[in-house]
Image (cartoon, helix red, strand yellow):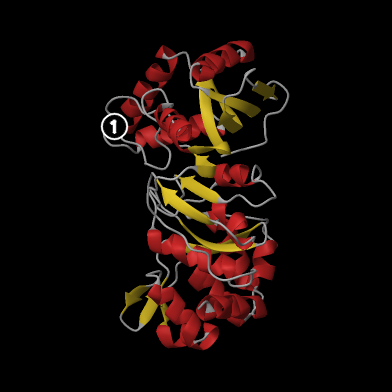
Amino acid sequence: MNDGATMLRERLEDAGYFAAYSQLGDGNFRSYDWEKMAPALPETTRMLWHFFLLGAKVPRADIRKLIGESALRFLRGHGLCRNHGRDISMGPLVLISHRELVFFAEQGRDPAGYFGEDTKALMTLLPCHGTGRCLVLYPGCGAAALPLVTKGGGHCDFAEGLFNKQLIEANLRLADSTGPGGFPEERIRRGKNPYDLILATVPSLVEPPGFRLSQVIAGGRDGRRELQRTLALARKRLAPEGQLLAVFIFFAENDSAKMRQRLEGFLGADGLDYSLTICSKHLMEIGVPIHNLILSAAASSGGDAAQAAARMQRHLKHLRYEAAYLIKGRFFRQRRPARHEIMDFSDLYYGGWTF
């Protein structure tokens, strides 16, 4: 039964929680914005806002009164709350919405329930028709699969990478609480049957020897380790007419022609057809978001921050990684003649998928 999930959504909608959240933009994930808006909210909405977005400790009796016993039981039954004597909190979890979907995500340095711009980018690739069996790799909070779940039919398996089973189960129930049909059967395991659809937000940041980046972003020494694993799994597990939908970063020279040569060489012997969109290019320069992210990740990996940043710079230079290319891709079982398509906007548009 989904009574608790349904009750939670109804109470939050009645209190204007989602109406206030929508003012900040779809899928907003910035605590700064939430803190700035909080003082302007009505008392009831403000208390829910502090509890579900700002990590506040709130008396258990007050939350029970605001959302109802069954909704509170839903939260506690999925291990989403933390006890603090008579108070409870959501800890690092936040309740957000994106594309009319409602789900929990996790903040922090190495979040098991990750949600980010790459997840949003992956969701733009989802087919509008039924998908049968779906495998979600590196699932984070499971948001990428939620549009499929709400359509009913089929089921999703979740495997590979860091994830929180209870969190994903809670999000599946939230998605289904107002959707058609009953709660879908999901098996969070590695199955043996072929998949009609595989989804992957591939960790693809460079991780030189001696560094230890978050599992959410680390892609090995050249940034391509997890992409290789994802493609290898797709070759084994895709159904004859299935497809892999993936988003990833591909590092290469600033020259886009050289980048395409590298990319085609990397994918050439893979045994999969592909249709890729290179959304944009971010230079490896101070001030550019992706470069700043890499340096901050290196600096926080331990030891002297300045030395770590300098080592990362040398490693990027050694690999001739002058730019990061943001790519959305569809991969299929290879046909004859092979289908290798690349639509490259990298020299035309800076945005498209940001950090």
The residue depicted at 32 percent of the width and 76 percent of the height is: 84
Q: Nearer the viewer, residue 203 or 41?
A: 203
Q: Nearer the viewer, residue 178 or 96?
A: 178
**Looking at the image, can residue 72 be seen?**
yes
At which x and y percent is residue 171? 51, 64
At which x and y percent is residue 75? 44, 74
**Looking at the image, can residue 254 be seen?**
no
The residue depicted at 51 percent of the width and 88 percent of the height is: 65
- Say which amino acid is labelled 1: Asp
CA neighbours of label 1 inside 10 A, class few (<14), some (14 to 19), many (20+): few
Count of numbered circles on the image:
1
The residue depicted at 65 percent of the width and 72 percent of the height is: 40
At which x and y percent is residue 48? 54, 75
Q: Nearer the viewer, residue 38 or 241?
A: 241
> As drawn, which residue projects farthest toward the right?
348
Q: Is residue 158 above or below residue 83?
A: above
Quarter placement of the C terminus: top right
The residue depicted at 42 percent of the width and 36 percent of the height is: 296
Question: Residue 174 occupies which quadrant of the picture?
Answer: bottom right
Q: Residue tagged by mark 1?
A: 304
Q: Is residue 245 above or below residue 228?
A: below
Question: Residue 287 occupies which quadrant of the picture?
Answer: top right
Q: Is residue 336 left or right of residue 162?
A: right
Q: Is residue 65 left or right of residue 100?
A: left
At which x and y percent is residue 17? 63, 72
